[in-house]
Image (cartoon, rainbow, N blue to C red):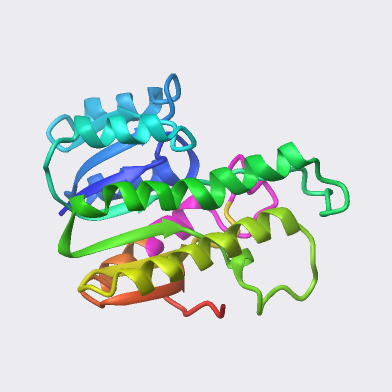
Amino acid sequence: MKILLIGASRGLGYALAENMLQRGYQVVATGRAHSTGKLEQLAIRYPQQLTVESVDITEPQQVNALHQRLGNGQFDMLFVNAGVKNDDRETIADVSTDEFIRVMVTNALSPLRVIETFKDRVTSQGTIAVMSSGQGSITNNTNGNYEVYRGSKAALNMFMRSFAARNPDGRTLLLMAPGWVQTDMGGPEARLTIDESIPNLLNTMETYVGRTGLHYLDYLGRVVPW
């Protein structure tokens, strides 16, 4: 299986890259410029399987340049991993306009721009997946908190729903919720380790290969309510 993995320089994205390589996938993995050091070290271990590229998905010209660099090759899966957050204590009443825009552009707008740019590089029976969050569920938001981040992931989910409606083809579309994971962003108090989340998340994606339409799932394959 050949994968284009966007956003793999650290945390969940890096763990996904490593797990995909361990399973024998061919992977093109990206990070922002000057942040790909760990990926380049990983490429030494997997020289025949891993290609490292740099791109900042918030810069459309860089996304277009990557599209050109990769030529006409086809991928079995495109996975877009992007996530930033504002200060956890900020509500909508507190957050600055600039910070709100930063979170929304990174978490919602830019992943869909990548998907729109690279959809022609995904095979007709392939998978287009994006890292969402259980916090993007409107149904499950019963206690508030993290509302800017929640809003960005809910917007991401809505944009993917629109993409699915406009592209009713044979491909599988996945919104993946990895759970609350111990990363730089998730923090040390998170419920799951990376090793408890990512291998299971990848298992779920493998199970859904060939299942057409849009699916919003957690790392154990459970359907997440919208």
Q: Is residue 81 visible?
A: no
Say which quadrant the C terminus sits in. bottom right
Judge from the rendering whether residue 141 lies leftward or rightward of residue 216; answer left or right: right
Task: State the predominant SS element of the stretch in magenta.
Answer: loop
Considering only vertical position in the picture, is 35 above or below 128? above
Front residue of this view, candidates 145 and 67: 67
Report the front residue among 207 and 82.
82
The number of callouts visible is 0
Which residue occupies the extreme top position in the image?
Answer: 34
Relative to 163, does residue 89 appear above or below in the rendering? above
Please tell me whether residue 191 belongs to the stretch shown in magenta: yes
Query: Which percent across, then down, holds residue 171?
Result: 23, 69
Q: Residue at horizontal 22%, vertical 73%?
A: 169
Q: Where does the magenta region start and end?
A: 182-201
**Quadrant of res 154:** bottom right
In the rendered view, does 128 fall on the left or right side of 149?
Answer: left
User: Could you say where residue 150 lies in the image, as x and y percent from the top left?
Assistant: 67, 60
| Residue 139 in picture, x, y percent from top left | 66, 79
Q: Nearer the viewer, residue 169 or 178?
A: 169
When the figure is inspected, residue 222 is found, relative to residue 159, above or below; the finding is below
Residue furthest to the right: 93
Q: Quadrant of residue 98?
A: top right
Location of the N terminus by quadrant is: bottom left
Residue 46: say if magenta.
no
Residue at 22% over, 42% down: 27
Identify the residue at image location x=36%, y=60%: 129
> Residue 57, how many percent across, how many down?
44, 37
Confirm whether residue 132 shows in the render: yes
